[in-house]
Image (cartoon, grey):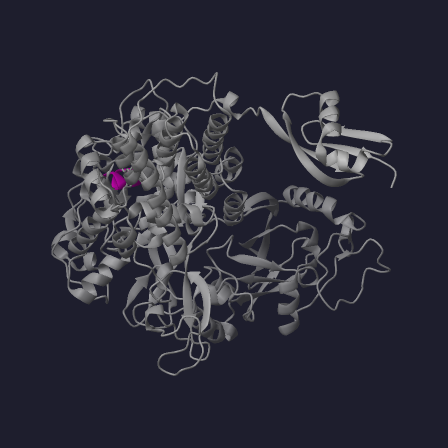
Amino acid sequence: MESRYTPASIEAKWQTIWDEQGLSVTPDDPDKPKFYALSMFPYPSGNLHMGHVRVYTITDVIARQKRMQGYRVLNPMGWDAFGLPAENAAIQRGVHPAKWTYQNIDQMRQQLQSLGISFDWDKEVTTCSPDYYQWTQWIFLQFLNAGLAYQKESAVNWDPVDQTVLANEQVDNEGRSWRSGAKVERKLLKQWFLKITDYAEALLSDLDSLPGWSDRVKLMQQNWIGKSTGAYLEFPILGDDGQASDSKIGVFTTRPDTAYGVTYVVLAPEHPLTLQVTTPDRRQAVEAFIDEVSQQSEMDRTAEDKPKRGIPTGGTAINPFTGEDIPILIADYVLYEYGTGAVMGVPAHDSRDFKFARENNLPIKVVIVPDDADNADMELSEAYTDPGVMVNSGRFDGNASERGKQAIIDYAEEEGFGKARIQYRLRDWLISRQRYWGAPIPVVHCPNCGAVPVPEDQLPVQLPETVEFSGKGLSPLAQLEDWVNVPCPTCGTPAKRETDTMDTFIDSSWYFLRYPDAQNETAAFDIETVNDWLPVDQYVGGIEHAILHLLYSRFFTKFLRDRLNLNFNEPFQRLLTQGMVQGLTYKNPKTGKYVPATEIPDLDHPTDPETGEPLEAFYEKMSKSKLNGVDPLQVLQKYGADTARMFILFKAPPEKDLEWDDADVEGQYRFLNRVWRLVTQFAEDNPPRQPLETTNLSKEEKELRRAIHTAIREVSEDLRDEYQFNTAVSELMKLSNALNDADCQKSAVYREGVETLVKLMAPFAPHITEELWQMLGYSDSVHQQGWCELDETALVLDEITLVIQVNGKVRGNLQVPADADKATLERLARESEAAQRYIADKEVKKVIVVPKRLVNFVVPK
């Protein structure tokens, strides 16, 4: 028997045995209830960080407990393996993206296995593998066939130095290219989109069906979808003949009640109507402005703290409500991709319009006034944006503005220049990426047939292996003539492949559907199998994915439900967004330079080793740039995986940020050592097994058994709904202390306590508990045992502590039978030594008895 706790040897041994036994393999037992536990899969960067350790440990505890509770559990893992870092590696290191990616996967898989995470590796998926992206392409074709995938010209981020398109994530906060540092421009290119807007209302309304999601995440999605109810109004453009032309400027507004106050309209510079309405005398200025704006990022144009700039086009529109001519301007803050690409200017009742009108000498017309306003022509020092009474609005004067909204819409519909409309902030999803390391879009462009889908039996369209990576110019795929030039699948005419690849969010929008049937070679997944396992019962991942990934996954699920008859509406039943892992960070406030703790001589008085200047010390999210990370492998080597897991779980509730503290890690290591000594000592003494009789227990046995079943109750509750792992670990510590303090080691109750402690700890610290379970004489795995059952009778107290008060002041306490009635409690309290010292020679005027709590005697003072 091992006398010392040596995590390195124990953990390696059991990881090998579990793998041989297939302990984490997903069972195929339809008689058991299913539980699908899922962690957001990682990008294979090559090394785990503490954030990874936290999220996978959380999911693993849930999965392990569910197995012990009799569920068939699916707990898979895979790799979100396409993306920019692999191409960066190809450019910087001269390594092919595939080689770099698969090396990283192998390394990270080994690291995950060393943590003892009970993933079913038979279900592993890798998004950059052809056997996965074949089905990513197949799903794209389903969108295309359904009319929900399309191509159109769209403004993209353009790097003028490297002559390439950049994704939004490649543009920094200053609007510069991550690669060249050049100021990013906006450029119109033909791009592929998915029509997520067709599902906007379902994505919004179905949030109400997700009680297992936090209100914070649901609100973030609601705001991103951004439902607005209002009106679509059309403003005719004045022709050269001074009459209204057939061309109209369409706008969406949530304030149709202000339509009579429209004094100008604004087009996005890139709007197709911009040059059409521009007069010859304004063309040069307008084209110069368009060129200037094209060099700004979307972030620059829409930033709240940036001035809104615009110029007149010389064109004129007609306000159909008043018949008045109003100028047409263009402005940088209006984006063609948002709404209709045009807005109506109501400066009297919109703060942005008010400021813009003042700066451009545009008229300001009041059409809404407060209920108590003296006149309809009040002077404004700022926009009036509250509800009120309509004025200067023709037939609608005197209407309450809220009621006037519908009246204006009805009038516009009658006259044919407007209608009610619901609009969403959500835009169709641009999925084109001009890069190599992504799933090729399975389309061939034929001069005769147009965009032709690649036949399903020709999937996957594989990425060619012989590619040069310079980081400049067109996508590497576009430069491969042999790959690009192919016959049209429909007519055989020489044609060209689509050279864009898909946004990597596409890959992660359906991976959870592949896991239950990961080895399927003939379909993306078997519908019956997926309908059995989905939705995911518990999804765990970072809050940074609260909008895009989760929204896209919900979109894919709803589309495939409609296309393939899936029997569920939402992919993730419950969602846990864990907090960040923060490290103690040292920064020179003068230089902004971060300093690693290893270079600071005195951490109690930290100073810059180069300048001697005092450093700021604070907790911040662990990252390479902050030099505050902790290498999980070093922690594992020093303390073992179980200690790392216990610390991660104990330090903070899962949804809160966790501050890494070496002293607390050491504390969990000491706790595991105490448990080791407790159980090994009991195993060495080897008291005979005897049936547990609960009828004639001693007082000490009853107290210990109460502690045992209190732990079962509390740990079970902590793992039931809110996953309060930190308080669950506290309960394990209490039970350990109770066993250490007990003096009935030969009792069957003590054995019940030791075995309960080991089983309750098993999901948290799987290796040490497996070793201890074997020491207790068992051959089956502790992880295959049933979860501890609560005996409610063990929690019933034989005695309670009764507080004795005299005139409301505590004078002592007394052990009394738990079932004593009021009369008995009063008698026992009156007879007690504590009471007699204060009431023996006095008249008791009143006795207050609170059952199971206290007796208070009221006597003259």
- Foreground residue, 324 or 186? 186
- The answer to whether residue 694 is above or below residue 152 is above
Magenta segment's dominant SS is helix
Residue at image position (53%, 49%) is 223
- The answer to whether residue 285 is above or below residue 334 is below
Residue at image position (74%, 57%) is 367
Indicate the quadrant where residue 848 lies: top right
- Residue 495 sits inside the magenta stretch: no
Residue at image position (37%, 72%) is 595
Residue 675 in view here? yes
Residue 107: image location, x then y, percent: 20, 51
Residue 450: image location, x then y, percent: 26, 46
In this picture, which residue range is highlighted in magenta?
135-141
Q: Does 286 sit left or right of 99 as displayed? A: right
Q: Does 35 sit left or right of 235 as displayed? A: left
- Foreground residue, 157 or 746? 746
- Foreground residue, 818 or 278? 818
Residue 40 in view here? no
State the quadrant of the N terminus.
top left
Residue at image position (38%, 72%) is 594
Indicate the quadrant where residue 325 lies: bottom right
Residue 572: image location, x then y, percent: 42, 36
State the quadrant of the C terminus.
top right
Q: Does 260 sit left or right of 152 as displayed? A: right
